[in-house]
Image (cartoon, coloured by chain):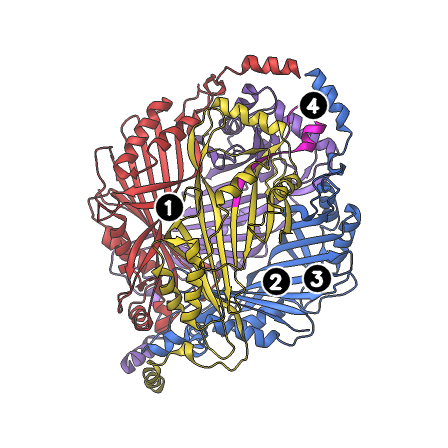
Chain colours: A red, B blue, C yellow, D purple
Amino acid sequence: MEEMKVQHSATSSEDTQSLPDKRDVPLDLVGITGFQCPATIAGWEKDLNRAQSVVATISLGVDLDAERKGVHLSRLMEVLLASRSEIRLEGLMGLLEETRARQGAGVAEIELEFTYFLERRSPVTQKKAMQGYRSWYRGRLTGSGKSTLNQVVEVPVMTLCPCSKAISDYGAHNQRAYVTVTLNHEGMTSEKELEVHLEEVVEMVEESASSPLYPLLKRADERYVTMSAYDHPVFTEDVARNVVTRLRGDQRFDSFKVSVVNEESIHNHSVQAVVQHRNT
Amino acid sequence: MEEMKVQHSATSSEDTQSLPDKRDVPLDLVGITGFQCPATIAGWEKDLNRAQSVVATISLGVDLDAERKGVHLSRLMEVLLASRSEIRLEGLMGLLEETRARQGAGVAEIELEFTYFLERRSPVTQKKAMQGYRSWYRGRLTGSGKSTLNQVVEVPVMTLCPCSKAISDYGAHNQRAYVTVTLNHEGMTSEKELEVHLEEVVEMVEESASSPLYPLLKRADERYVTMSAYDHPVFTEDVARNVVTRLRGDQRFDSFKVSVVNEESIHNHSVQAVVQHRNT
Amino acid sequence: MEEMKVQHSATSSEDTQSLPDKRDVPLDLVGITGFQCPATIAGWEKDLNRAQSVVATISLGVDLDAERKGVHLSRLMEVLLASRSEIRLEGLMGLLEETRARQGAGVAEIELEFTYFLERRSPVTQKKAMQGYRSWYRGRLTGSGKSTLNQVVEVPVMTLCPCSKAISDYGAHNQRAYVTVTLNHEGMTSEKELEVHLEEVVEMVEESASSPLYPLLKRADERYVTMSAYDHPVFTEDVARNVVTRLRGDQRFDSFKVSVVNEESIHNHSVQAVVQHRNT
Amino acid sequence: MEEMKVQHSATSSEDTQSLPDKRDVPLDLVGITGFQCPATIAGWEKDLNRAQSVVATISLGVDLDAERKGVHLSRLMEVLLASRSEIRLEGLMGLLEETRARQGAGVAEIELEFTYFLERRSPVTQKKAMQGYRSWYRGRLTGSGKSTLNQVVEVPVMTLCPCSKAISDYGAHNQRAYVTVTLNHEGMTSEKELEVHLEEVVEMVEESASSPLYPLLKRADERYVTMSAYDHPVFTEDVARNVVTRLRGDQRFDSFKVSVVNEESIHNHSVQAVVQHRNT
């Protein structure tokens, strides 16, 4: 036991991760994932003065040369925590630059997942309440300056089936659908500010469906939503296409992806539609 | 190092779990959980000759006296695997008896979770397809002979809101709901056979909603489902009550619980209704 | 159809949920579930002046008489949102009282689920970082004044297997375990304050395992954690029992439950231990 | 409303999905997703005569021209169910050909997710038990004949940290890791058979970690696993690299991806490593 201790102490000052590796296998990404952390998201909404406290689930990593044995994981955490109190979009690219520098890496990548809340007013009685939208920011920075930022938001909406309405004497099946929009911004730098706010994307999606969802509806509101949805039937395909027509040609981002999952109320499975488009 | 090896070898013949414990804390349940295993479910349906291959997620455990340090976990697995090829309901209580005996325990408990498939025919064109229903069997056996078996099945259905229909000039919001029924059988023994089949419970629930769900619908079927659901509006509360009226007084089980979660198509949250009832 | 339309217009001012029901089925619980909402948790920690912003997933409901058709769901939301900006423990029972009054109900129940963050310092270098703990508060209020509050927190820890250590010449398998502690407070009123803080429970659990987990560890910390865990081996059963010995006899709550799920590093399934105890 | 009703009756024989669309938005993928179905997987293992019954979760879809309003969803289901009783790898590309033909589409895509079971023997006592591996097959067929098949399997293993071992006098933290390997086969046709079986991939991954996992271990086995893992420490990075060295240069597939998620027993978050490689 004592001998083992001595033997181990001998190696204990050595930094195993810094040792050379002989397998000749560079890795695309090494890092932490699934780290939960409170964060303040500032400057991500129309009202720039209002910051929102969120709970973020975070991945942060770098690529790794074939020669190096491992990544310094605790340094990833230290870079992250230094900016913990307030994560800003402008700050995201700077955080990636610091990560690259601290690791001597070529590429640095980050993903933040969080639920973002926006106030929704019921359509008739104007009752206010907050509704949550799952959101993601993904940033990637390379040595050659090819940096990208993905802005992603999932918007729950209501869809009423046009086929069901057309073939039935009355009624039409309708359901919740989840629309995920990904905006790709290329050539992001730490000086550049995002011009698109999550709230804008949410509104475009809500206008593309049979009806938005609301956290709080009184009877007059429910009547309005029911009839309005019946007046605006959409297939899963239609929602995807309606969102595309709104995002197409917008020069504030380079490309985008729209993914719709329609939780059919007549089946126990879903229907999906996916489309990618390049604006620039 | 050598000494440690010797020291450890000295203790290696000792069964740590069998050592006495001095904290004076008996435990209610100790065992394995989340073990996935293929299983053949026989005799759990109307057509008794047809066995269904399922993938079961299993928990199996026993209580533990204050004096004993631990449970023999590998023996739990051995009891389980001996009956792996075909798990029968009649077999479940026998498996618990063997578990108690092998562990010298007072109480033995098992839970099996699996998806059970039933053929569903579309209402007009009679197109056939399989639909899956999440199911659970939970058994508990005590030394005093107080044994129980829970038969649980989750049935997805369609609900159309009566309020929305009543207050609107046309249309009505509708959505998927999940109805979970738990039947409690007391005094189960290894000789006793279950008289209620999952399929029966599924059918009772499907008749209690606005419409069943179907894996495959042609246009004529979709028209029928749409109009039939509009003709049979139900609140979350109604589904729960309709199921209760069907199960109430049935002497084949001692008590039951009905839980309905309605995935509102106008909100991003759900509505639930829960009720328990004693028949005997 | 025309007649139906007319009839529908005629009934549109009628409140369907208030209609009498003839099935004679009272319901135990009807309400909203899965509603996500930002909340400020105040007074739930040692440092009473510091409030934490969390994202809560909420269920709120009441029982329903056999005679009444439905619950006023939008009123549940209104009661909830009135207290949205700052949910306090003292406030929880008051919120349930208001819910009962607004619905004319006998029983009111609430559940809040959220991730609570506490600062953790690494054991040697004292590096600080936040670690999240899934938490739940469940309150129940009845007309007869039999009110209860459940305080629940899930604590991730490290467990090192004593059997593996004893039978091996070197090494010992170890893994993450999740310990869920539920404290039951009976006879809660809106005047009464909780005397136990989540942080206290977290610390008791962390002392009951082989080692706490840490968000950030430097090399000296990792060495300490590795050796400290090896020096404090515990079975799943031991963790449960160690927590019981710390909670047993504490008169600040009436009963408690400890549930440990050990994610075995040698298997792809888990081992669990569960125990309930009454203090008063 | 009356007119709408009449209009609806008039259009009820019309197939809404076949109508022309004027938004000029072609869609990349439209189809069903999340459909659960029992399936028999044949020819996917070394012992070709043994077929395994699994529960598959399926997505099937096609691309959609800008001019067409929608996809015929029920036909997707019909193509799928015709081959339900036994899904073979050879059959997958044929199923995609039929899907394209029935929809008049350019591209057809399928994904099957299922848990595949393989027998595992404990290393010393040779105790046999089944262990489940999450698996996916993804096929894609285009009009230009550019077809691909992805063979994906997730393998749970044990990893023991080399740094922890090196810096500590005794012990070393270890944990479960999940290794996901994706093999990409280009130019697949309905005549071509897959030459790589899932079992082969599972074995290569299990040899790349500190130890495989086992469903059933007796004391002698646990001793062996503990010491063997201590003798073969690997970082997350090492597991990824070890798998790459085994897959690199194998001409039976064109490219591959390895993704490792290490569920650190000293943290409540994970560490990941990702690498892609082209063989041909």
Compared with residue D171, is residue C147 higher up or lower down, i.e. above or below? below
Residue D53 coordinates in the image, percent (x, y): 62, 52
Whether residues under marks 4 and 1 lie with C-beta atoms below 8 angstroms apart, the answer is no
Q: Nearer the viewer, residue B168 or D194?
A: B168
Q: Is residue C164 left or right of residue D193?
A: right
Q: Chain of mark 3?
A: B
Tell me the tag on residue B152.
Answer: 2
Q: Is residue B45 left or right of residue C115?
A: right
Q: Which residue is mark 3?
A: B148
Residue C159 magenta-highlighted? yes
Q: Nearer the viewer, residue C229 or A280?
A: C229
**Secondary element type, mark 2:** strand
Residue D191 magenta-highlighted? no
Distance, label 4 to label 1, CA atoms, is: 50 Å
Q: Which residue is mark 1?
A: C51
Whether residues under marks 1 and 3 lie with C-beta atoms below 8 angstroms apart, the answer is no
Do the residues at pointers 3 and 2 share their chain? yes
Q: Amino acid at mark 3?
A: Thr
Q: Which residues are magenta?
A: C154-172
